[in-house]
Amino acid sequence: MKLPRRRFLQLAAGAAALPVASRVARAQAFPSRPITMIVPYPAGGPTDTIARLIGESMRASLGQPVVIENVAGGGGNIAVGRVARAAGDGYTLSIGHWGSHVVNGAIYTLPYDLLTDLEPVALISDGPQLIVAAKSVPAKDIKELIAWLKANPGKGMVGATGVGGASHLAGILFANTTGTDIQTVPYRGAAPRMQDLLSGRIHLAFDQAASALPQVRGGNLQAYAVTSKTRLAVAPDIPTVDEAGLPGFYISVWHGLWSSKGTPKEVVRKLNAAAVDALADANVRARLAELGQELPARERQTPEALGAYQKAEIDKWWPIIKAAGIKVD
């Protein structure tokens, strides 16, 4: 039977529209089953704690459980790679931070692209660092610290945990920015570094607020500044780097949420709305503050804002990392 040309074109157009209609229907029904949020580090760490806090709160908005799965190894790359390879349906999420989703692209050879193989969902928190020093350092503020380091080239020691980690890169950026010569002392973890800082074996560290603040409040360390544009809500007495005389020295181990490439925009919007609702919860906000995490402004919680921020951070940090010759095989 020969179909009239108009009828043929109508049928062809209908057939072509079926995949689109199917995707739209799936997006409208999302989520119809539990969602997996993959944490690139072991259970019990800061990222895991934030994931469980956010995931549990997102359950109420989504109407489905958010299952936390810890996939450690490879500096976080195994977990992120798994999400990058997953189906783009919104059921597999990657939670991570500045290290796993920015720095790793410069220090590792990755089998995925951090910007094109993931779909940004929401910026969750900012984690600025505190610039702290041993009590024995004869400087009461940043300006005096820089003067002391310049008067003693090569003698000042800064503790760093992990190659390419926040404290390591902060030390490099600080030396480059201030024109000082500082020795980097590597540590396997934050605990032994803190022990040496408290005893005065090393002089300086860039540390997370949750770790450093108890020692600062106990009078065991000096705190010079927080590496952000605004003061910490949990430590309003500590000046920002701008106020302290080191303008623009911003470093944040921020956390974000991503889905797999190809996730429909409607699904991304639903995931984003659930994350935004979680960040509006008073209990979530209080707990994040206890962890030394600052909440991003509402306009920074969009998928577009996270994508732009991640790219800006890559543009900022990759040249610094590559110039320093930092590489992990």
Image (tube, helix red, strand yellow):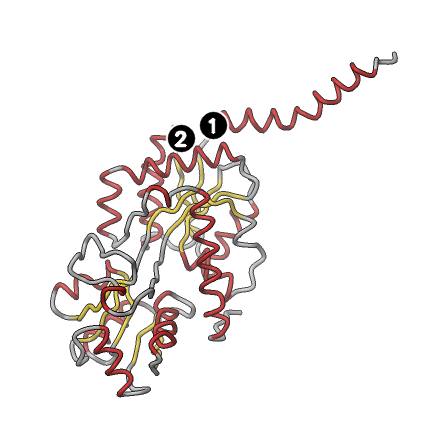
Q: Which residue is mark 2?
A: 64
Q: Relative to 237, is 164 on the left or the right?
A: right
Q: Which residue is mark 1?
A: 32
User: Residue at point 36% right, 74% down?
Assistant: 177
Depicted 130 relative to depicted 6: above or below: below
What amino acid is at disc 2? Gln
User: Which residue: 37% across, 65% down?
Assistant: 166
Pick whichever, 290 or 3, lies toward us.
Answer: 3
Please report whichever mark, 1 or 2, sits nearer to the chain's N-terminal start.
1
Above or below for 312 versus 33: below
Which secondary structure lies at badge 2?
loop
Q: Are marks 1 and 2 in contact (CB under 8 Å)?
A: yes
* Residue depicted at x 55% and y 44%: 261
Q: Amino acid at mark 1?
A: Ser
Q: Which mark is residue 258?
A: none
Name the element at disc 1: loop
Task: For label 2, count other residues whose C-alpha is less than 10 Å away and answer few (under 14), some (14-19) or many (20+).
Answer: some
Horizontal side of 213 relative to 255 (left or right) equals left
Q: Residue at x 33, y 64 (%)?
A: 248
Above or below, 8 relative to 128: above
- Measured as percent of width and height from the top left, residue 154 is found at 33, 86
The x and y percentages for residue 118 are 52, 47
Quadrant location, the N terminus: top right
Question: So how many labels did they put on this image?
Answer: 2
* Label 1 neighbour load within 10 Å: few <14, some 14-19, many 20+: few
C-alpha gap between disc 1 and disc 2: 7 Å
Identity of the residue furthest to the right in this view: 1
Instruction: Please provide percent x and percent y for residue 68.
Output: 39, 43
Q: x and y percent of residue 11 in the render?
A: 74, 18
